[in-house]
Image (spheres, coloured by chain):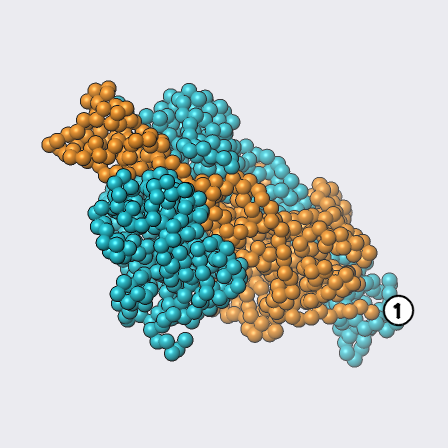
Chain colours: A cyan, B orange
Amino acid sequence: MRKIYLEDTPLKEAQQQIANRIHFMPLVEVIPTREALGRVTAQPIYAKVSMPNFHASAMDGIAVKAEKTYGADEQHPVRLRYQVDYVEVDTGDPIPDGFDAVIMIEHVHQIDKETVEILEAVAPWQHIRPIGEDVVIGEVIVPDRHKLRPVDLGALMAGGNVTVPVLRKPRVAIIPTGTELIEPSENVAEGEIIEFNGTVFAAYLQEWGAEPVYHGIVKDDYELIKSAVKSAVQDADMVLLNAGSSAGREDFTVHVVEELGEVLTHGVATRPGKPVVVGVIDEKPVIGLPGYPVSAYLNLEWFARSLVFHYYGLLEPERQRIQATVGRRIVSVMGAEDFIRVTIGCMDGQFIANPLTRSAGVTMSMVRADGLLRIPPGNLGYEQGEVVDVELYRPLEQIQHTIVSTGSHDLSMDVLHSLIRKKNPGRFLISSHVGSMGGILAIQKGEAHIAGVHLFDEETGTYNQTYIEKYLADKDVVLVQLVYRQQGWFVKKGNPLGISSVHDLAKPGITYINRQRGAGTRLLFDYLLKQEAVDREGIYGYSREAVSHLSVAAAVAGGTADAGLGIYSAAAAMKLDFIPVSEERYDLLMTRAFYLSSQGQELLTCIRSDEFVAEMEALGGYSCRDSGKIVFSTSMSEI
Amino acid sequence: MRKIYLEDTPLKEAQQQIANRIHFMPLVEVIPTREALGRVTAQPIYAKVSMPNFHASAMDGIAVKAEKTYGADEQHPVRLRYQVDYVEVDTGDPIPDGFDAVIMIEHVHQIDKETVEILEAVAPWQHIRPIGEDVVIGEVIVPDRHKLRPVDLGALMAGGNVTVPVLRKPRVAIIPTGTELIEPSENVAEGEIIEFNGTVFAAYLQEWGAEPVYHGIVKDDYELIKSAVKSAVQDADMVLLNAGSSAGREDFTVHVVEELGEVLTHGVATRPGKPVVVGVIDEKPVIGLPGYPVSAYLNLEWFARSLVFHYYGLLEPERQRIQATVGRRIVSVMGAEDFIRVTIGCMDGQFIANPLTRSAGVTMSMVRADGLLRIPPGNLGYEQGEVVDVELYRPLEQIQHTIVSTGSHDLSMDVLHSLIRKKNPGRFLISSHVGSMGGILAIQKGEAHIAGVHLFDEETGTYNQTYIEKYLADKDVVLVQLVYRQQGWFVKKGNPLGISSVHDLAKPGITYINRQRGAGTRLLFDYLLKQEAVDREGIYGYSREAVSHLSVAAAVAGGTADAGLGIYSAAAAMKLDFIPVSEERYDLLMTRAFYLSSQGQELLTCIRSDEFVAEMEALGGYSCRDSGKIVFSTSMSEI
């Protein structure tokens, strides 16, 4: 049928294989120095002229003949005549012939228009910048293979190099393949996908100093792909194909490379990122990148980035690394090298790393990741509390300025994030969605600064407080009212199935989509079932879990469920009908230490601002009548 | 006469003044997402479509109806019919209507063309990527004021944002002023200077995300400058003037800003960088930058960089910092904030920082600097051995891969640097020139890996060894032969003064230029004087010191001296006549630890290579007949 297994080549081995095989011969181009920022020199660059190329005054003052000043002191001032013994000079002016020293204007006493007096003798060449003080003709300004920085351009031009020989940027062809792909468009039909991996590749390549050459989309057809690769190899220094690098029916990359050249590697022992093709055609590297975005970007870095720096003969720069404590247990299997996207929070000066989804298909996990944790092949993972080495995706100072938010998902967190950034430049707020109970546990474990919670207690008829008393008895926390919000049923436009209660959901043929365990909305659903005495076994889809209001709404809009429970704004976003069920209180839980910190006070100021109220109420389904009120504190008197 | 004093405003105060005074109102532009790398969002960006927007297979395999698989196990395989019970799908394919799960191809046994068998039941939605798994419609992809990275572009496009609203880049006008300035040209007359500060400003501004707008050169004329500033303020968000920011006769900036707007600061309490003008015209910042390159670049960073990030509402990124040990005493005066350019060497795992020249006119000091050391106003400096905080100009890993060379200057060090970079990507060699004795002391103090030395001992008639025995008795060092080189007199073309011996130099009217104390060439000169019994008092210019062969040659070529002593290649570079005096041995001194290290061995390989010999002999005045030979070691037997 099909070849379905890939190799398990260790990553380092695959990288070394291609690096040893390829010998780039970069072309040289001579370009204006003004346009050479970031380019790499093709040879050592020598000064062609000296800078300055004349003797120049180093001060504002007068140029004199030093010997005329000899003997001057407080008791024996010396008078000098204009044009004969001195001339006025400013910093940078050439020293006129016959003069050989400069006296600072502060040390000159004007007697009359034609005469000055000085109180101190000067040595020849005092305050004169001699020829070549900055750059001397023949001196090496920058060495070979030097990546030009702004100040290098200045020194090159000072040394008379108005053009500079640099290595031509490596041209990297990007060939997107896939019948489902379309070029960027406002209108995307079902089954179509906007080609976006190519844009990400091109942007990374630009950052690394390469020149991306974007090829149009090629359909999943062996001959079409082959001819695209053939012509790309003629023009480019490296070719990237995406996707089709695995071993499925329509994965043509490996066969095309085999036919036109040589496959070095098909499959590396990493997770994610396994299905990559590394080959050589006409002495040029050809990389088949996987279709899943995360796998593709990791392989791009492992292979294309290495090869770009190999081309220039430069050391590949390393990302900044920090030591972080593992917040949640991370499991790995023997044999594969695991690359785990993590968020990093700075809690009381300690860095806590928590894993994001491992799905290779979730581009947003790369957007949200603060860093990457590598688990070596022989390691079974890390326990909570272990200290690990993490490679940073965001600058450390950003991570240190980030408020880490978790718990239940609500759009108010997005609004708050934008507001806090606007009011406090450089401040970030990053949310992960683990449900209300998850939020309480995160505060307990010190994994987050704040948690959004909406946990209804059937017995007391109150929100949140009883849960906090139960689970955070030993913690010093503050609960702040954020918003009231409408919860209701999400149903298709026009409510064709006539759903308005939990009884309707239990009817045959109706498919429900639930929230994950620990979500406040799930507790509300359980409460409604109990109140109406409907058995959860009778709800088809009770065990199918979505992790956010928007995911539930998307499932209903997409037709895989007929109804779900959630907030108004999510229904509105997905153009669904919304049948109100109840109003609930959504609070922010935080430690007292955070509440009292400047970050905490900035956040409170945002919550109590008119902008916040206006933006929330514009979304619909929200009320801000008590926003910013302290609901509860473990030692109320101190606040 | 003239206003000659500047203010001493503390830097922080001057920065805060302008930041508080300016309220940028950035314009918004909507651009294709493909071109948005590095741009800053003007609002939070929400997903317009879900990604995927259809249920997609997460595996290569077959799509099935889950209920048809119920009951399947090893004992009870279930057979499925093509098109009826299953269809083939590849990763990413839409799931056809009526199917609700995917089975991996590895778990499918093909019975015949129309039939497959499975041994395990599957749950609904297994291996299906639901709509919105990556991005859910309505979700925030990136917040407001977010600098877009490659992966953000992918997520934006996945979420249907093929265009994105971003802040227009701040337009920064650069107005170079100065009658002596010319646009970049191959031909520079005496008294002319190629305008290069503007190129450096533009390059930095680009790196920081601004759009530099380069204005042509304006002559030193009040009205011309005023009219250039007036029109620049109309068009730009910020205006930079360079130079004319001090208080001299032709320093017009402060007066122009006073007439058109308001001067906030004229002079900051820093060294270098004092003479800066910070003002406001039409609510736009106007910065008058000093003419000296180092002062200009520091002020650019202090004011223009801060304001660019202020414009975007982003935190100004910090440079990486390290703790380094001060290698040489650094003196500061009370009251001013000192900014010292330093080189940093990594010696046995410890970072050693040594000051470069403090002259604000030396662009090359910025090229050579590995970092910047700030000395607060109230501090008198640092003693050798003190540990200080240094802001890095080069990546740490580059510093760690750098061979630190010091001692006497010879062109062979430049040739070696290029060779070692070519043969060992990522390796650097950085030289400072402190003379042969300085080199020996640097090895003694552990400030350098290698030192170039050529010290002749009159008594023994040998080079270097007796000095090493005297000064490095307790060190374990190795002396490697590098080159033999010709020393001789530098005289003007045609030798118009007929100089051929030290006797000629003592004649009246002849001006000599000497090397600095501790330079091997100076010792040679002293030896020649002694040999010929010429008194140094009789040499006019004996006390004028230049720090390199090229500087000596430049002085002779420039006419401020009639003769000097140095090596052939420097005379050739400056088109001077060269009258040979003697051949000397130029060796490389290194610690045994360095000699035995991989860096040391790489260096030896270069010294012994044919390329090195060919390049040196092509320069003229060199012989490599013993290059790479071990001359001497404190424990010879071990090498």
Q: Would you call the spot at circle 1 few (<14 residues within 10 Å), some (14-19), or many (20 or more)?
A: few
Give the residue displayed 33% in from the left and 64% down from the top: A463
Secondary structure, mark 1, is: loop
Q: Position of residue B197 (x, y in %)?
A: 67, 52
Residue A275 located left or right of residue B393: left
Asked if one can make out residue A305 in the rendered structure from this viewpoint, the answer is no
Amino acid on which the number 1 mark rests in the picture? Lys
Q: Say if B177 sits above or below A263 in the image.
A: below
Q: Say if A589 sits above or below B612 in the image.
A: below
Outermost residue to the bottom: A75
Q: Say if A21 sits above or below B48 in the image.
A: above
Q: Position of residue B495 (x, y in %)?
A: 74, 46
Given residues A218 and B125, the one toward you in this image is: B125
Q: Which quadrant: the C terminus of chain A?
A: bottom left
Place residue A264 in its image quadrant.
Answer: top left
Give the residue displayed 60% in from the left and 38% down from the top: A165
Given residues B277 and A626, the one toward you in this image is: A626
Place residue A113 in its image quadrant.
Answer: bottom right
Asked if one can make out residue A188 in the rendered structure from this viewpoint, the answer is yes
Residue B590 located left or right of residue B167: left
Q: Position of residue B309 (x, y in %)?
A: 57, 57
Where is mark 1, residue-wise? A113
Q: Say if A141 sits above or below B304 in the image.
A: above
Give the residue displayed 75% in from the left and 67% down from the top: A104
